[in-house]
Image (cartoon, rainbow, N blue to C red):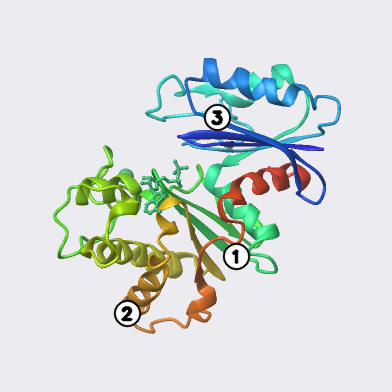
Amino acid sequence: MYGAIEAGGTKFVCAVGDETLSVVDSVSFPTDIPQKTIPQVINFFEKYRDEMIGIGIGSFGPIDIHKESPTYGFITSTPKKNWENFDFIGTLKEEFDIPFFWTTDVNAACYGEYVAGHGKGLRNLVYYTVGTGVGGGAIQNGSFVDGFSHPEMGHMLLQRHEADNFNGTCPFHNGCLEGLASGPAIEKRTGKKGYEVSQTDVAWEIEADYLAQCAHNTTLILSPDRIIFGGGVMKQAHLLPKIREAFEKKLNQYVRTPDIETYIVTPKLGDNAGIIGCLALARDQKL
Ligand code: ADP
Ligand code: ZN
């Protein structure tokens, strides 16, 4: 049996599953301070202690992913209360002395789609989540893209849409993708909950423009086989065709991407991409 932890900024999902990535048991609870959340995690896995041979974790971040670093397995500079510089892996290792496989929440979702969703059979995949924040994960030739750290594509800078005079929500950057296109950005721009904004509202044109800029930049930098957009905001089914249309206009046939209907898509695994990805990290011993 494998363990999986999807550590999101809003909620945690813990699961155990088998070799085929079928979820046998799972639990979800809101992300509180670590002193409250980690005991809930341990409590869930306690009953599988003897069967579990590894745990995959996809975490909100930024996180330290470098094995040789003294703070490997830590959450690093998050604004989330009490999670800054939290030794995630070290704390769990004290309870469960088995291998841990650790990456960002979006890399985990990317890996889930890669092994069991819309990335199956492809070599290069990029996954964005557009929700409370915006994050991006990337796999190239079967490995996660990383350098001095993991990518933080959710904070790429964009050009303002001409009809948008909203300042953005990111405390770090003026005009980044997350600040302009996350769920909270839509809510602050329109004064309404995302699901209440009418399909014909210009807010969706603005949203599609920003996500199309993201796809444009991603295409030109990574040249992936496919780009997946998931997360709560993508539940607006009319948004995907709007993104594809804006993307094709912007790219202006500068490079020939795969057919647009298969190139920019929503996740096959839906909200389960992350947890299935975490199970697969443990199964495939992805570090
Ligand atoms: P999280 O990012 O916290 O893991 P989600 O991916 O569900 O969770 O994203 C939550 C965000 O998505 C919220 O800002 C919410 O307003 C927005 N959202 C959720 N459902 C919809 C919807 N149907 N239409 C538009 N926005 C939505
Ligand atoms: Zn930012």
The type of residue carrying mark 2 is Lys
Mark 1 and mark 2 lie on one chain; the one further toward the N terminus is 1
Q: Amino acid at mark 3?
A: Phe
Q: Is residue 198 left or right of residue 275?
A: left
- Residue mark closest to the camera, 3 vs 1: 3
Name the kind of residue labelled 1 in the image. Answer: Asn
Q: Quick one: label 3 or label 2, which is nearer the N terminus? A: 3
Residues marked 1 and 2 touching at CB (< 8 Å): no
Q: Which mark is residue 124?
A: 1
Per the image, label 1 sits on a secondary structure element best described as loop
In the depicted view, which residue is nearer to us: 137 or 221?
137
The residue sitting at 68% across, 65% down in the picture is 120
Image point 53% across, 15% down: which residue? 35
- Looking at the rendered image, the disc whose residue lies closer to the viewer, 1 or 2, is 2
**Circle 3 residues within 10 Å: few <14, some 14–19, many ≥20:** few
Q: Which mark is residue 249?
A: 2
Q: Which residue is located at x 61 percent, y 57 percent?
A: 269
Seen in the picture, residue 7 relative to 92 is either above or below; the reply is below
Contact, CB < 8 Å: mark 3 with mark 2?
no
Disc nearer the start of the sequence (3/1):
3
Q: Quadrant of the C terminus?
A: top right
Q: In the displayed structure, would residue 24 be above or below residue 107?
A: above
Label 1 packing within 10 angstroms: few (<14), some (14-19), many (20+): many
Closer to the camera, 61 or 30? 30
| Separation (CA) of disc 3 from disc 2 | 42 Å
Residue beneath label 3, please?
29
Asked whether mark 2 lies closer than 8 Å to ligand 1, one says no
Q: Are marks 3 and 1 in contact (CB under 8 Å)?
A: no
Image coordinates for residue 90, horizontal then vertical, percent = 64, 21
Q: Residues within 10 Å of mark 2 (few under 14, many from 20)?
A: few
* Depth order, front residue of 240/2: 240
